[in-house]
Amino acid sequence: MKRTMLQRLANLAAAIVLVGVIGEPGLAEEFRVENKIYVGGEKEPRTESTTIFHEGLVYDYLQRPAEVTIFDKGRRRFVLLDPNRRVKTEISADEVSALNKNLYDWAASQSDPYVKFLANPKFDEEFDEATGELRFTSPWLTYRVVMSDPQSEAIARQYREFSDWYTLLNTRINPGSKLPFARLIVNEALEKRSRLPKEVHLTMRAKRGLPFQKITVRSEHHFVRTLVQSDRDRIKQSDEFVGMFRPVDFQEYQKVGE
């Protein structure tokens, strides 16, 4: 039996309470992921970031604008750091989970077929053995995923968990963004195959207008199994920033620095 989206959200929220492989620093894998996101046919990435997994924590470094997001599973929180304004804010995982539950309830109750689809996405899933690609097709969204072998099930689990939570967090820090539930399905399918995403090609049909009007987004992910000294220096500095920066509430954090 396929799980409903509500069950996926409930299981994700419950998993963060448990002490498991991902949450135990001595057992968690350490690795780095270099990320680039392209929109349409652009040759230069719209967004670049580096994600570092270290001792059970995940540090995500956005290049422009400069920002650090720390996922602290043990404390059930995200810490956001703004190095330019030297301020920080904290968002609990429970808040993120509750928000997405409310978004799901709202979307599922709408009459608009597109919004209802985003609440409960249904895809035709196909694995192309010739290319090693995983495809998810629907009238509204299509994902084409070029996969890589992590050579470690622990890395696949760690990355899937962070990717799920980071996708959910996006709805909190970017109000009005696309609902996250379709990507959760893709993440789950990748972990079941013990694979990582090397490239993710997303094609979205414009909600209004002619069927051939499409929006395309491509993300590239380069996984590095070993941390170098510069990674550890970056983590050390981020930990120091957590202790140094002025704490503000999320509303103030979101304001543009004066």
Image: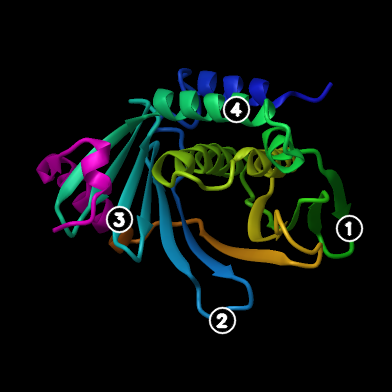
Q: Are marks 3 and 1 in contact (CB under 8 Å)?
A: no
Q: Which numbered tag is attached to residue 171?
A: none
* CA gap, disc 2 and disc 4: 37 Å
Q: Which of the two labelled residues, at mark 2 and mark 1, occupies the earlier sequence position?
A: 2
The picture places residue 156, in percent across and down from the top left corner, at 61, 43
Which span is picked out in magenta? 232-258
Nearer to us in this view, 38 or 35: 38
Asked if 140 appears above or below 130 in the picture, the reply is above
Q: Residues within 10 Å of mark 4 (few under 14, many from 20)?
A: few
Q: Which residue is mark 4?
A: 106
Name the residue located 84 percent from the left edge and 46 percent from the top edge: 125
Amino acid residing under circle 2: Lys
Quadrant occupied by the N terminus: top right
Name the residue located 74 percent from the left edge and 67 percent from the top edge: 213
User: In front of the other: label 4 or label 1?
Assistant: 4
Q: Which residue is mark 1?
A: 129
* CA gap, disc 3 and disc 1: 39 Å
Nearer to us in this view, 193 or 242: 242
Q: Which residue is mark 3?
A: 67
Q: Which of the two labelled residues, at mark 4 and mark 3, occupies the earlier sequence position?
A: 3
For label 4, the SS is helix
The picture places residue 126, in percent across and down from the top left corner, at 87, 50
Asked if 81 appears above or below 115 in the picture, the reply is below
- Say whether residue 148 is left or right of residue 142: left
* CA gap, disc 4 and disc 3: 31 Å
Q: Which residue is mark 2?
A: 43
Q: Which of the two labelled residues, at mark 4 and mark 1, occupies the earlier sequence position?
A: 4
Q: Which of the two labelled residues, at mark 3 and mark 1, occupies the earlier sequence position?
A: 3
Q: Are marks 3 and 2 in contact (CB under 8 Å)?
A: no
